[in-house]
Image (cartoon, grey):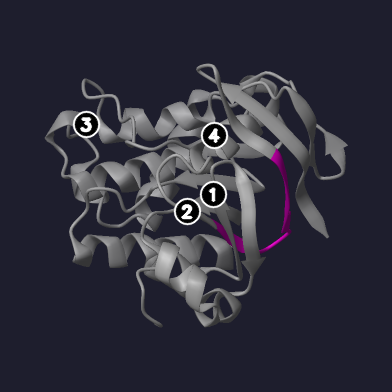
Amino acid sequence: MKLLELDALEVCYAGVEALKGLSLYVEEGEIVTLLGANGAGKSTTLRSISGLLKPAAGVIRFAGQPITGLSPEAIVGRGVAHVPEGRRVFPGLTVRENISLGSCNRRTTRTERATEVARMLKSFCELEPFESALGWTLSGGQQQMVAIARGLMAQPKLLLLDEPSLGLAPMIVQQVYELIAQIRRQGTTVLLVEQNAHMALSVADRGYVLETGRLVIEGPPEKLWGNDEIRSAYLGGRKA
Protein backbone atom coordinates (compact mmCIF):
# COMPACT_ATOMS: atom_id res chain seq x y z
CA MET A 1 0.00 0.00 0.00
CA LYS A 2 1.27 3.46 -0.92
CA LEU A 3 1.26 5.42 2.32
CA LEU A 4 2.67 8.62 0.79
CA GLU A 5 2.45 9.89 -2.80
CA LEU A 6 3.86 13.07 -4.33
CA ASP A 7 2.52 13.83 -7.79
CA ALA A 8 4.21 16.52 -9.96
CA LEU A 9 5.07 18.65 -6.93
CA GLU A 10 6.33 22.18 -7.57
CA VAL A 11 7.58 24.35 -4.71
CA CYS A 12 9.05 27.85 -4.76
CA TYR A 13 11.21 28.74 -1.79
CA ALA A 14 12.84 32.15 -1.21
CA GLY A 15 12.11 33.09 -4.81
CA VAL A 16 13.69 29.93 -6.23
CA GLU A 17 11.88 27.00 -7.85
CA ALA A 18 13.10 24.35 -5.39
CA LEU A 19 11.03 21.39 -6.64
CA LYS A 20 10.22 20.99 -10.34
CA GLY A 21 7.48 18.45 -10.89
CA LEU A 22 8.73 15.91 -8.35
CA SER A 23 6.86 12.60 -8.12
CA LEU A 24 7.66 9.81 -5.68
CA TYR A 25 5.99 7.39 -3.31
CA VAL A 26 6.62 5.56 -0.05
CA GLU A 27 5.06 2.17 0.65
CA GLU A 28 3.75 1.38 4.11
CA GLY A 29 6.49 -0.26 6.19
CA GLU A 30 9.39 0.98 4.04
CA ILE A 31 12.46 3.05 4.78
CA VAL A 32 12.99 5.32 1.78
CA THR A 33 15.88 7.76 1.49
CA LEU A 34 16.25 11.00 -0.48
CA LEU A 35 19.82 11.59 -1.64
CA GLY A 36 21.58 14.39 -3.49
CA ALA A 37 23.88 17.37 -3.11
CA ASN A 38 23.11 20.46 -1.04
CA GLY A 39 20.35 22.44 -2.73
CA ALA A 40 18.88 19.39 -4.46
CA GLY A 41 15.49 19.89 -2.80
CA LYS A 42 15.60 17.12 -0.21
CA SER A 43 14.71 19.18 2.87
CA THR A 44 12.21 21.18 0.82
CA THR A 45 10.45 17.91 0.02
CA LEU A 46 10.09 17.03 3.71
CA ARG A 47 8.98 20.56 4.62
CA SER A 48 6.32 20.41 1.91
CA ILE A 49 5.02 17.06 3.14
CA SER A 50 4.77 18.30 6.74
CA GLY A 51 2.99 21.52 5.73
CA LEU A 52 5.80 23.96 6.52
CA LEU A 53 5.94 24.95 2.83
CA LYS A 54 2.96 25.33 0.51
CA PRO A 55 3.36 23.78 -2.96
CA ALA A 56 2.72 25.96 -6.00
CA ALA A 57 1.40 22.95 -7.92
CA GLY A 58 1.01 19.21 -7.60
CA VAL A 59 -0.63 16.92 -5.05
CA ILE A 60 0.54 15.24 -1.84
CA ARG A 61 -1.50 12.24 -0.71
CA PHE A 62 -1.19 10.48 2.61
CA ALA A 63 -3.02 7.19 3.19
CA GLY A 64 -4.93 7.88 -0.01
CA GLN A 65 -6.18 11.32 1.05
CA PRO A 66 -4.89 14.68 -0.26
CA ILE A 67 -3.04 16.71 2.37
CA THR A 68 -1.68 19.42 0.06
CA GLY A 69 -1.93 22.83 1.73
CA LEU A 70 -3.10 21.56 5.12
CA SER A 71 -1.59 23.15 8.23
CA PRO A 72 1.33 21.40 9.96
CA GLU A 73 -0.94 20.71 12.94
CA ALA A 74 -3.52 19.00 10.72
CA ILE A 75 -0.85 16.92 9.00
CA VAL A 76 0.61 15.78 12.34
CA GLY A 77 -2.94 14.81 13.29
CA ARG A 78 -3.16 12.65 10.17
CA GLY A 79 -0.09 10.68 11.29
CA VAL A 80 3.01 12.43 9.90
CA ALA A 81 5.82 13.55 12.25
CA HIS A 82 8.79 15.63 11.09
CA VAL A 83 12.19 15.59 12.85
CA PRO A 84 13.93 18.60 11.28
CA GLU A 85 17.58 19.14 10.51
CA GLY A 86 19.50 20.52 13.49
CA ARG A 87 17.49 18.57 16.10
CA ARG A 88 15.78 21.71 17.56
CA VAL A 89 15.92 20.51 21.16
CA PHE A 90 14.70 23.17 23.59
CA PRO A 91 17.83 24.04 25.62
CA GLY A 92 16.01 25.18 28.77
CA LEU A 93 13.74 22.13 29.04
CA THR A 94 14.70 18.74 30.43
CA VAL A 95 14.95 15.60 28.33
CA ARG A 96 11.63 14.43 29.75
CA GLU A 97 9.94 17.77 28.97
CA ASN A 98 11.35 17.87 25.44
CA ILE A 99 10.06 14.39 24.69
CA SER A 100 6.67 15.12 26.24
CA LEU A 101 6.11 18.01 23.81
CA GLY A 102 5.80 15.50 20.98
CA SER A 103 2.37 14.41 22.21
CA CYS A 104 0.81 17.88 22.01
CA ASN A 105 -1.16 16.87 18.89
CA ARG A 106 -3.07 14.26 20.91
CA ARG A 107 -5.55 14.60 23.74
CA THR A 108 -3.89 12.85 26.65
CA THR A 109 -3.99 13.26 30.41
CA ARG A 110 -0.91 14.19 32.38
CA THR A 111 -0.72 10.63 33.69
CA GLU A 112 -0.97 9.15 30.20
CA ARG A 113 1.78 11.47 28.91
CA ALA A 114 4.04 10.58 31.84
CA THR A 115 3.52 6.88 31.15
CA GLU A 116 4.29 7.31 27.45
CA VAL A 117 7.42 9.37 28.16
CA ALA A 118 8.64 6.71 30.61
CA ARG A 119 8.09 4.06 27.94
CA MET A 120 9.98 6.16 25.40
CA LEU A 121 12.91 6.62 27.78
CA LYS A 122 13.12 2.85 28.22
CA SER A 123 13.18 2.46 24.43
CA PHE A 124 15.94 5.09 24.22
CA CYS A 125 17.87 3.58 27.10
CA GLU A 126 20.87 5.89 26.65
CA LEU A 127 18.64 8.85 27.51
CA GLU A 128 17.12 7.38 30.66
CA PRO A 129 19.97 8.46 32.99
CA PHE A 130 19.65 12.02 31.61
CA GLU A 131 15.88 12.44 31.85
CA SER A 132 16.23 15.43 34.19
CA ALA A 133 19.15 17.02 32.34
CA LEU A 134 18.56 20.26 30.41
CA GLY A 135 18.69 20.09 26.64
CA TRP A 136 21.74 22.32 26.30
CA THR A 137 23.87 19.93 28.39
CA LEU A 138 23.37 16.96 26.04
CA SER A 139 25.80 15.74 23.41
CA GLY A 140 24.84 15.99 19.73
CA GLY A 141 23.97 12.31 19.61
CA GLN A 142 21.80 12.54 22.71
CA GLN A 143 20.00 15.57 21.29
CA GLN A 144 19.31 13.65 18.07
CA MET A 145 17.81 10.79 20.07
CA VAL A 146 15.65 13.26 22.02
CA ALA A 147 14.42 14.76 18.75
CA ILE A 148 13.53 11.33 17.33
CA ALA A 149 11.83 10.28 20.57
CA ARG A 150 9.84 13.53 20.54
CA GLY A 151 8.70 12.78 16.98
CA LEU A 152 7.63 9.26 17.94
CA MET A 153 5.52 10.65 20.80
CA ALA A 154 3.08 11.81 18.11
CA GLN A 155 2.53 8.09 17.33
CA PRO A 156 3.08 8.71 13.60
CA LYS A 157 2.44 6.33 10.75
CA LEU A 158 5.19 8.14 8.82
CA LEU A 159 8.34 9.63 10.36
CA LEU A 160 10.25 12.24 8.34
CA LEU A 161 13.92 12.43 9.34
CA ASP A 162 16.08 15.28 8.02
CA GLU A 163 19.86 14.70 8.20
CA PRO A 164 19.87 12.63 11.42
CA SER A 165 23.63 11.99 11.19
CA LEU A 166 24.65 15.63 10.67
CA GLY A 167 27.58 16.61 12.88
CA LEU A 168 27.76 13.30 14.75
CA ALA A 169 30.79 11.10 15.38
CA PRO A 170 30.86 7.87 13.32
CA MET A 171 30.13 5.65 16.35
CA ILE A 172 27.07 7.75 17.22
CA VAL A 173 25.91 7.71 13.58
CA GLN A 174 25.92 3.91 13.75
CA GLN A 175 23.76 4.01 16.89
CA VAL A 176 21.30 6.43 15.28
CA TYR A 177 20.92 4.18 12.24
CA GLU A 178 20.42 1.10 14.39
CA LEU A 179 17.63 3.08 16.04
CA ILE A 180 16.09 3.96 12.64
CA ALA A 181 16.06 0.28 11.67
CA GLN A 182 14.42 -0.53 15.01
CA ILE A 183 11.74 2.12 14.46
CA ARG A 184 10.78 0.46 11.17
CA ARG A 185 10.68 -2.99 12.80
CA GLN A 186 8.21 -1.57 15.31
CA GLY A 187 5.87 -0.57 12.48
CA THR A 188 6.66 3.05 11.60
CA THR A 189 7.37 3.98 7.99
CA VAL A 190 10.40 6.26 7.52
CA LEU A 191 11.28 8.85 4.85
CA LEU A 192 14.90 9.83 5.38
CA VAL A 193 16.96 12.73 4.01
CA GLU A 194 20.70 12.15 4.24
CA GLN A 195 24.10 13.38 3.01
CA ASN A 196 25.65 10.15 4.31
CA ALA A 197 24.61 7.95 1.39
CA HIS A 198 26.45 4.88 2.70
CA MET A 199 24.53 4.83 5.98
CA ALA A 200 21.20 5.75 4.40
CA LEU A 201 21.38 2.99 1.80
CA SER A 202 22.46 0.47 4.43
CA VAL A 203 18.96 0.62 5.97
CA ALA A 204 16.78 1.80 3.07
CA ASP A 205 14.54 -0.35 0.91
CA ARG A 206 14.65 2.22 -1.90
CA GLY A 207 16.27 5.55 -2.66
CA TYR A 208 15.57 8.62 -4.78
CA VAL A 209 18.43 10.79 -6.05
CA LEU A 210 17.49 14.44 -6.59
CA GLU A 211 19.31 17.16 -8.48
CA THR A 212 18.15 20.82 -8.43
CA GLY A 213 14.58 19.82 -7.61
CA ARG A 214 14.25 17.01 -10.13
CA LEU A 215 14.39 13.24 -9.82
CA VAL A 216 17.54 11.76 -11.41
CA ILE A 217 17.12 8.08 -10.59
CA GLU A 218 15.26 5.87 -8.13
CA GLY A 219 15.40 2.26 -7.09
CA PRO A 220 16.74 -0.22 -4.52
CA PRO A 221 20.24 0.35 -3.09
CA GLU A 222 21.91 -2.14 -5.43
CA LYS A 223 20.56 -0.29 -8.47
CA LEU A 224 21.91 3.04 -7.23
CA TRP A 225 25.31 1.60 -6.32
CA GLY A 226 25.45 -0.17 -9.68
CA ASN A 227 25.10 3.07 -11.69
CA ASP A 228 28.67 4.36 -12.17
CA GLU A 229 27.63 7.92 -12.99
CA ILE A 230 25.26 8.21 -10.04
CA ARG A 231 27.72 6.55 -7.69
CA SER A 232 30.49 8.93 -8.71
CA ALA A 233 28.36 12.07 -8.54
CA TYR A 234 26.24 11.43 -5.45
CA LEU A 235 27.28 8.33 -3.53
CA GLY A 236 30.91 8.91 -2.71
CA GLY A 237 32.49 7.45 -5.83
CA ARG A 238 32.83 3.82 -4.80
CA LYS A 239 30.67 0.75 -4.32
CA ALA A 240 29.63 -0.22 -0.80
Q: Main secondary structure of the magenta part?
A: strand
The CA distance from mark 4 to mark 1 is: 12 Å
- Residue lying at the far left in this picture: please name it: 137
Report the front residue among 167 and 150. Answer: 167
- From the image, tell me which residue sits under label 1: 211
The CA distance from mark 4 to mark 3 is: 27 Å
In the rendered structure, which disc, 2 or 1, sits on the residue that comes first in sequence? 2
Report the front residue among 105 and 218. Answer: 218
- From the image, tell me which residue sits under label 3: 135
Looking at the image, residue 215 lies above or below residue 101: below
In the rendered structure, which disc, 3 or 2, sits on the residue that comes first in sequence? 2
Q: Within the image, what quadrant is residue 52 found in?
A: top right
Q: Give, as a three-letter code, the residue at label 3.
A: Gly
Point 35% across, 54% down: residue:
124
Viewport quadrant of the C terminus: bottom left
Looking at the image, residue 38 lies above or below residue 104: below
Looking at the image, residue 109 lies above or below residue 137: above
Asked if the residue at tag 1 contacts the one at tag 2, i.e. Cβ–Cβ closer than 8 Å, the answer is yes
Residue 94 shows in this picture: yes
In the rendered structure, which disc, 4 or 3, sits on the residue that comes first in sequence? 4
Residue 145 falls within the magenta-colored stretch? no
- From the image, tell me which residue sits under label 4: 44
Q: Secondary structure at mark 3?
A: helix
Instruction: Check residue 36 in the rendering and tell me which mark sits there, or answer none.
Output: 2
Q: Which residues are magenta?
A: 21-33
In the rendered structure, which disc, 1 or 3, sits on the residue that comes first in sequence? 3
Q: Residues within 10 Å of mark 2 (few under 14, many from 20)?
A: many
Asked if the residue at tag 3 contacts the one at tag 1, i.e. Cβ–Cβ closer than 8 Å, the answer is no
Report the front residue among 83 and 25. Answer: 25
